[in-house]
Image (cartoon, rainbow, N blue to C red):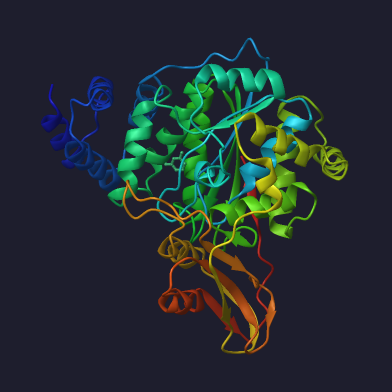
Amino acid sequence: MNILEIISKKRDKKALNKEEIEYFIEEYTKGNITDYQAAALVMAIFINGMDYEETKNLTIAMAHSGETLDLSDISDTIIDKHSSGGVGDKITLIVMPIVATFGIPVAKMSGRGLGITGGTIDKLESIPGYRTDISLEEFKNNIKEIGISLIGQTKDLAPADKKIYALRDTIACTESIPLIASSIMSKKIAAGANKIILEVTYGKGAFMKTEEDAIKLSKIMSKIGELAGIETVCVITNMNQPIGKNVGNSLEIEEAVRALKGDMEEDVKEIVFHITALIMKMANLGDNLEENKKKIIENIENGKAYKKFVELVAKQGGDTKYLENIERAKYIVEVKAEKEGYVQDLNAETIGKSAIALGAGRMKKEDTIDHTAGIVLSKKIGDKVLNGETLAYIHTNKENFEDVTKEILTAYKIGKEKPEEYKHISKTI
Ligand code: URA
């Protein structure tokens, strides 16, 4: 067996067998297959797809490409949550500390930004000192001691995903059901949780453009989860416009801090409460979601949720004082409406691309991020706008922001008619 035969087979639209998939994952992880050969195969998978059997074999091979964590000595119920990616998606940062206030152990391994979507790890790293690269031993200890740990993808857990994830980002291969399913599920299997909740996004700012594809992706991930003995619940969310107001790393930390103190945007609130209430149900803390939501409000209002986040930041070496005084970019520039009416559309893809242009994301694997760069949206779908009113604020350290200002204006569609109510959650599978 060799990599050329495997690439040709997928290029010619044939299904790969288990041995071929295992060979690719093992040899690429070891560095015996080059990035350009892996890129060719990943592109062939992107174009020609994979059936369930191939996707499952790819997931399992990636999950076992490094260590796998056993967290059974911590608790019978270890919950993990993951998003398939979005623009302004800070839900994980808000949900996980709230979950931990109920004594449910949180073991969360997150990724960096991919394509136009932001990554939880890049957001956490905007907090000075926060270490996302702690050892697995420290990860486990933190969960034992404070009930929560949020880390980046270590080189030890699912290293094949780490390499393929970074590669996909730079060869325009992010929007693929088998590649997303195997990427997410391999990490989840390796990280040792036995119950997972997946926020599966669709729309302009997500990898799945349609609700139908998000459902397809959810079903594949649930089936793989079942096979691995992991209870898997998928919440399908609408990512046509960004979630919440802030897009960009430290700006999203700021919004998460506000949310954990009780000041949440309506869309953020709906998704956070639904997912947290479901997690409580999965952890046998109550089947009635409305009752669970009342308990969530209590733990936000009594300060426990924010306190848990501060505890997490401190435990992982972050500067907790920074949370009260988040650094701003040098320039904050208004983007003003050029006509009056209702916001009928706010294109999350355009906003995501604009945020990257400002420095909030990467164009190349090795690019560094400007943590303070991003966009704050003052108006969202359904809002009334007056001519000359502020639609959004650009946060940037770059002197030249004319092009981004124009681009953000194209993200907004303003018209006379008030649009239909925007649905944030489509279904739970
Ligand atoms: N999140 C992941 O971990 N992987 C993907 O491919 C997409 C989102």
Asked whether residue 278 appears in the rendered view, the answer is: no
Where is residue 75 shown, x and y percent of the image?
A: 68, 15
What residue is at 32 percent from the left and 44 percent from the top? 168
**Which quarter of the picture shows residue 277?**
top right
**On the rendered image, what quadrant is the C terminus found in?**
top right
User: Which of the pair 387/139 is nearer the observer?
Assistant: 139
Which quarter shows the N terminus? top left
Q: Is residue 63 left or right of residue 302?
A: left
Horizontal and vertical percent position of residue 31: 22, 26
> Camera-side residue: 31 or 314?
314
Frontmost residue, 44 versus 366: 366
Number of marks drawn = 0
**Relative height, residue 254 to residue 147 (above, below):** below
Percent coordinates x, y for residue 72 in the rendering: 61, 12
Q: Nearer the viewer, residue 424 or 100?
A: 100
Q: Residue at x 24, y 29 (%)?
A: 16
Q: Quadrant of ligand 1?
A: top left
- Picture coordinates of residue 156 (x, y %)? 41, 21
Query: Where 14 falls versus 348 (above or below)?
Result: above
**Residue furthest toward the top?**
73
Residue at 74% over, 37% down: 98
Residue 349 visible in the current orientation: yes
Residue 372 as seen in the image, left or right of residue 46: right
